[in-house]
Image (cartoon, rainbow, N blue to C red):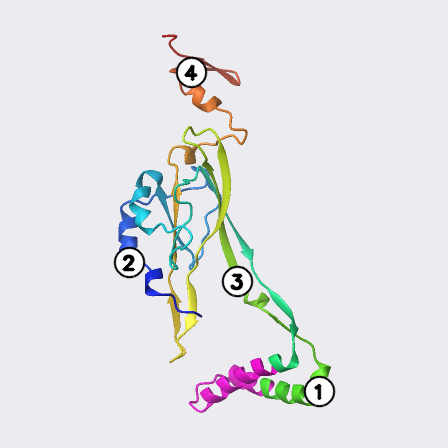
Amino acid sequence: MAKAKQSDLLPLPAIRQLLKSCTTLLQPLTHQVSALPKETDLEYYFVPAEQMELFRPYYRPGKPFKNLKLVNFERPAISLTFYNKHKYKIDRGIKPDSAHDILKEQRDNLYARSFLDELTPGQHQKLQDIDSLLRAIRQSPDQFQFCVSNYHHYYRYWYCSFRYFEDTEEIKTGTANEHMLKHTQRTDERSTEKLINERLNIIFIDTKYITRPVPYDNKLIDRELETYTDRVNFGKAALYIRSAE
């Protein structure tokens, strides 16, 4: 894993302190938001658009920070949907020599650790299995086919889909999708300890419209009706009344 440059990282504890003063909570039944992700490795916060300028120093279009994402800076959400995708790839063009090198590297790593008596019973079995595979491939490389895939790692990318107003008159809306950063783990090269790379996401919301549906046909009837000071319900309709002055 390539090490991020210091200039690409931000002091997250300080940013969390800032967030304490300006975050808000959203609830699916109260706000225009889908079920919220409950993932221990997904850290995200909702910030009202009124506080957005506090985060402008961290806004770098085209060169974002590695450990902080301003998901929708300058496009506060009027509705939000979260979903995840199982992302994977497969390379079927793996040659015997490449497969041999991959297995040998795994075998050598396990073999080195065996001298320190650090292998579990499962790792001992894996070492024996890899030794058997290496011998078989050396003897008959044409009898095997190989591919490489991260499918069973089952890494899920989380996405945030949001609607926002494209104009200052709040008439036309647009929709965008952004992936979200997750905490990642890596093994310390000097030990077996897992190191966590923390990453957080900030999602800006329109506090007025996140609480009410905005029609996709962009009709302004809701804002027109707000100009009437009185409302009298009758049946399934209502009479709206305002002064003609």
Q: State the mark number for residue 13.
A: 2
| Magenta span dominant secondary structure | helix
Residue furthest bottom in the image: 115
Q: Specify few, some or many for label 3: CA neighbours under 10 Å numbering under 14, 14-19, or 20 or more.
A: few
Which quadrant of the structure image shows residue 48?
top left
SS label for mark 2: helix
Circle 4/circle 2 CB separation < 8 Å: no
SS label for mark 4: strand
Three-letter amino acid code of the residue under disc 3:
Tyr
Q: Is residue 79 left or right of residue 56?
A: right
Question: What is the quadrant of the C terminus in the image?
Answer: top left
| Mark 3 vs mark 1, CA separation in Å | 34 Å
- The magenta segment is 100-129
Three-letter amino acid code of the residue under disc 2:
Pro
Of the residues tagged 4 and 2, which is closer to the observer? 2
| Mark 4 vs mark 3, CA separation in Å | 52 Å
Most foreground residue, 233 or 54:
54
Q: State the mark number for residue 140.
A: 1
Circle 3/circle 1 CB separation < 8 Å: no
Q: State the mark number for residue 231.
A: 4
Three-letter amino acid code of the residue under disc 1:
Ser
Q: Which residue is mark 3?
A: 155
Most foreground residue, 239 or 187:
187
Q: Residue at x 41, y 61 (%)?
A: 183
Q: Position of residue 231 (x, y in %)?
A: 42, 16
Most foreground residue, 125 or 159:
159
Tell me which label, 4 or 3, sits earlier in the chain. 3
| Mark 4 vs mark 1, CA separation in Å | 84 Å
Q: Is 218 part of what is drawn in magenta?
A: no
